[in-house]
Image (spheres, helix red, strand yellow):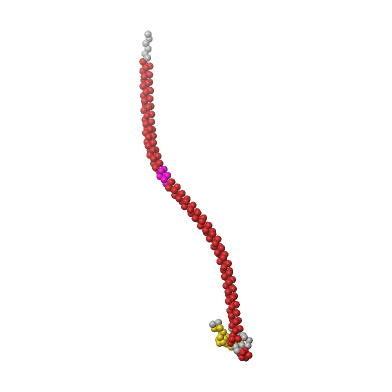
């Protein structure tokens, strides 16, 4: 019988197993250490993210409220602008109508001024003609009123004047009783 010692193989294998277990344990401890740090960092990061998310939600809600207020103001301003544009269009139409009437009135004023000028000329002409007729009437009437038949035959000159639209036989004007010439 031969005797073989196999314990050395068993010892090696057991040491090998122990080494593998030690290496595996060291590897697991290292992995757990890094995973623990990563998980702690991730948890802290997640908590910070959660806080940032809550702050962002609050800020977003505030901005949404401001946006809603601005939107309401914009709608109100838009309605005001619409009313203003309507009033502006109405005023523009009224202004156009007013300018048209003004133009017509200016045309009528021009026509009336022309008629007034024409009438003033006619009045002036009539006054001049009336004065000439009045003077001619006075000259022609002085001889029969102030001269007698004897004055007419002798060729005498008599004085006369106008007072209260009547001829009086005394005054600053003279009339030749024969020819009827007068200095009036």
From the viewer's perspective, is residue 100 above or below residue 28? below
> Viewer-proximal residue, 98 or 50?
98
Quadrant of the rendering where the N terminus is positioned: top left
Q: Position of residue 108 (x, y in %)?
A: 56, 65
From the viewer's perspective, is residue 142 above or below residue 68? below
Q: Is residue 103 found inside the magenta-colored segment of the image?
A: no
Q: Which residues are magenta?
A: 60-66
- Magenta: predominant secondary structure element? helix
When asked about the image quadrant of residue 117, the answer is: bottom right
From the viewer's perspective, is residue 59 above or below residue 40? below
Q: Position of residue 45 (x, y in %)?
A: 38, 36
Q: Residue at x 36, y 15 (%)?
A: 7
Q: Residue at x 54, y 83 (%)?
A: 163
Left or right, 44 with respect to 165, comes to left
Q: Is residue 172 visible?
A: no
Q: Residue at x 62, y 86 (%)?
A: 180
Q: Is residue 61 found inside the magenta-colored segment of the image?
A: yes
Q: Position of residue 137 (x, y in %)?
A: 60, 82
């Amino acid at each position: 019988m031969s005797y073989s010692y196999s314990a050395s193989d068993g010892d090696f294998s057991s040491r090998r197993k122990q080494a593998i277990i030690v290496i595996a344990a060291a590897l697991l401890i290292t992995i757990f250490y890094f995973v623990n740090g990563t998980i702690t960092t991730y948890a802290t990061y997640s908590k910070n993210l959660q806080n940032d998310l809550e702050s962002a939600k609050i800020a977003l809600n505030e901005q949404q409220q401001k946006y809603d207020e601005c939107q309401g103001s914009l709608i109100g301003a838009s309605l005001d602008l619409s009313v203003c544009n309507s009033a502006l269009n109405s005023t523009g139409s009224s202004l156009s109508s007013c300018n048209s009437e003004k133009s017509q009135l200016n045309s009528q004023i021009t026509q009336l001024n022309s008629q007034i000028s024409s009438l003033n000329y006619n009045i002036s002409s009539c006054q001049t003609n009336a004065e000439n007729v009045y003077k001619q009437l006075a000259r022609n009437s002085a001889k029969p009123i102030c001269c007698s038949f004897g004055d007419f035959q002798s060729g005498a000159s008599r004085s006369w004047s106008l007072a209260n639209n009547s001829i009086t036989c005394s005054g600053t004007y003279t009339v030749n009783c024969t020819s009827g010439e007068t200095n009036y």
